[in-house]
Image: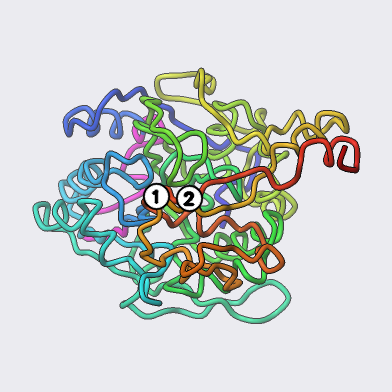
């Protein structure tokens, strides 16, 4: 199911797109899909198409933290013009009052509005039931049922950094197919990026995704996936192969997918194609264009990790979450979303003996009240002791 079997190269279309204007989006998406063989290779009239968007938190479209609603509108129009019924679905991260925030995310992001205007159907994965799938080594995983009810799933990820996994792309966007607060349980058991990557691998290998169309018109750099900076990348990326798409995106920001622990399980199991020699870039470019000035979290600088000296310097920059009392609104989303129950908003404290550095609190806070501070004193990291 990795869409990368055989000797043929996986294609990734990279298109220039400077705005969320409906006409420009439609033209560029259609152009990119045409370079991959055209829409007829992916959808047929009468199909039900599910658009899996990224609605991580209740944030507006201009935040660069969520799939832009106008991006989803353009894809919806294209599909409806081809005779498809369109669903728009996701399960958000975090919790408010111990309940998932997905319904609020659909409203704040503008997805409810565009769905109503375009005749699409919202699928809140918290309310649609689940299907059980088998995982490697036995056991089951429960994935939102609309992923299996739809005739074709089109993945609409956002181009973003992520302080836990390094990058959010086509591969990680499917974590949102796990409904509700079950996501926190996976964070609790998979406490490092490589272990978490094995969870993502099980999700991805059990899902057939027809096409991935990445919203990189406005990306996020720095401390993503919600507290970073809006970076105007001006791109749309399209591929049937999730790994090929993400590997090309990573090359655009100076990273190598082989240096990213979250992808280790996918690479080990031959899920998709990622090597430069196995991926053909098409569309408006013949190679991944470098995004100049894009800020990557320092701990994920792959080349540095290969050197012992630079590795220690990167360790200096490792972060842990801390509560910014002045910015905190006491909404308790961080407290309710913490899989280890390490946060007490009443006292503005984090119990670091429980904290696993999953960054869920940082990821979920729409007020940017979770700041990241150095995990250890720099001299202790470099020399092994405090001076």
Q: Which quadrant does the N terminus fall into?
A: bottom right
In the rendered structure, which segment of residues is drawn in magenta?
A: 33-50
Out of 1 and 266, give the one closest to the viewer.
Answer: 266
Instruction: Answer above or below: position of 244 versus 199.
Output: above
Q: Is residue 61 left or right of residue 203?
A: left
How many marks can you see?
Answer: 2
Residue identified by numbered label 2: 324
Q: Which quadrant does the C terminus fall into?
A: top right
Quarter of the image for residue 194 reads: bottom right
Residue 366 bears which disc, if any?
A: none
Out of 59 and 350, give the one closest to the viewer.
Answer: 350
Which element type, helix, strand or loop, lies under badge 1?
Answer: loop
Q: Colour scheme of this structure image?
A: rainbow
Residue 289: image location, x then y, percent = 50, 19
- Find out whether residue 44 is within the magenta segment: yes
Q: Residues within 10 Å of mark 1 (few under 14, many from 20)?
A: few
Marks 2,1: beta carbons within 8 A: yes
Q: Residues within 10 Å of mark 2 (few under 14, many from 20)?
A: some
- Find out whether residue 206 is within the magenta segment: no
Which element type, helix, strand or loop, lies under badge 2?
Answer: loop
Out of 139 and 224, give the one closest to the viewer.
Answer: 224
Q: Is residue 251 left or right of residue 233?
A: right
Residue 336: image location, x then y, percent = 46, 71
Q: Residue at x 59, y 63 (%)?
A: 350
Instruction: Answer above or below: position of 180 versus 175.
Output: below
Q: Residue at x 28, y 33 (%)?
A: 30
Residue identified by numbered label 1: 327
Instruction: Answer above or below: position of 152 versus 185.
Output: above
Out of 92 and 151, give the one closest to the viewer.
Answer: 92
Quarter of the image for residue 193 reads: bottom right
Residue 287: image location, x then y, percent = 54, 20
Instruction: Answer above or below: position of 371 versus 290.
Output: below
């Amino acid at each position: 199911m990795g869409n990368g079997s055989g000797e043929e190269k996986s294609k990734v279309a990279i298109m220039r797109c400077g705005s969320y204007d409906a006409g420009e989006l439609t033209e560029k998406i259609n152009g990119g899909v045409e370079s991959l063989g055209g829409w007829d290779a992916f959808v047929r009239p009468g199909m039900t198409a599910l658009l899996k968007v990224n609605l991580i938190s209740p944030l507006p479209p201009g935040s660069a933290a969520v799939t832009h609603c106008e991006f989803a509108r353009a894809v919806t129009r294209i599909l409806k013009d081809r005779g498809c019924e369109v669903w728009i679905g996701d399960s958000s991260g975090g919790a408010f009052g111990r309940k998932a925030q997905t319904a609020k995310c659909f409203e704040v992001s503008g997805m409810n509005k565009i769905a109503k205007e375009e005749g699409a159907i919202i699928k809140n994965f918290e309310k649609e039931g689940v299907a059980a799938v088998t995982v490697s080594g036995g056991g089951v995983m429960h994935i939102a049922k609309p992923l299996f009810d739809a005739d074709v799933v089109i993945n609409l990820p956002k181009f973003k950094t992520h302080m836990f996994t390094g990058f959010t792309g086509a591969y990680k966007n499917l974590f949102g197919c796990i409904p509700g607060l079950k996501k926190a349980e996976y964070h609790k058991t998979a406490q490092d990026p490589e272990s978490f990557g094995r969870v993502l691998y099980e999700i991805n290998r059990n899902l057939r995704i027809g096409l991935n169309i990445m919203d990189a018109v406005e990306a996020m750099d720095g401390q993503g996936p919600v507290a970073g900076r809006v970076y105007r990348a001006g791109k749309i990326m399209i591929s049937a192969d999730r790994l090929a798409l993400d590997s090309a995106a990573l090359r655009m920001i100076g990273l190598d997918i082989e240096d990213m622990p979250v992808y280790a399980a996918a690479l080990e199991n031959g899920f998709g194609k990622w090597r430069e020699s196995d991926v053909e870039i098409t569309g408006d470019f013949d190679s991944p264009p470098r995004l100049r000035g894009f800020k990557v979290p320092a701990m994920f600088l792959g080349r540095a990790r290969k050197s012992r000296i630079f590795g220690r310097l990167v360790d200096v920059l490792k972060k842990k979450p801390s509560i910014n009392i002045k910015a905190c609104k006491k909404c308790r989303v961080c407290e309710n979303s913490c899989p280890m129950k390490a946060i007490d908003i009443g006292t503005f404290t984090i119990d670091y003996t429980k904290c696993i550095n999953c960054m869920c609190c940082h990821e979920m806070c729409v007020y940017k009240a979770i700041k990241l501070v150095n995990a250890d004193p720099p001299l202790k990291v470099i020399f092994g002791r405090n001076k």
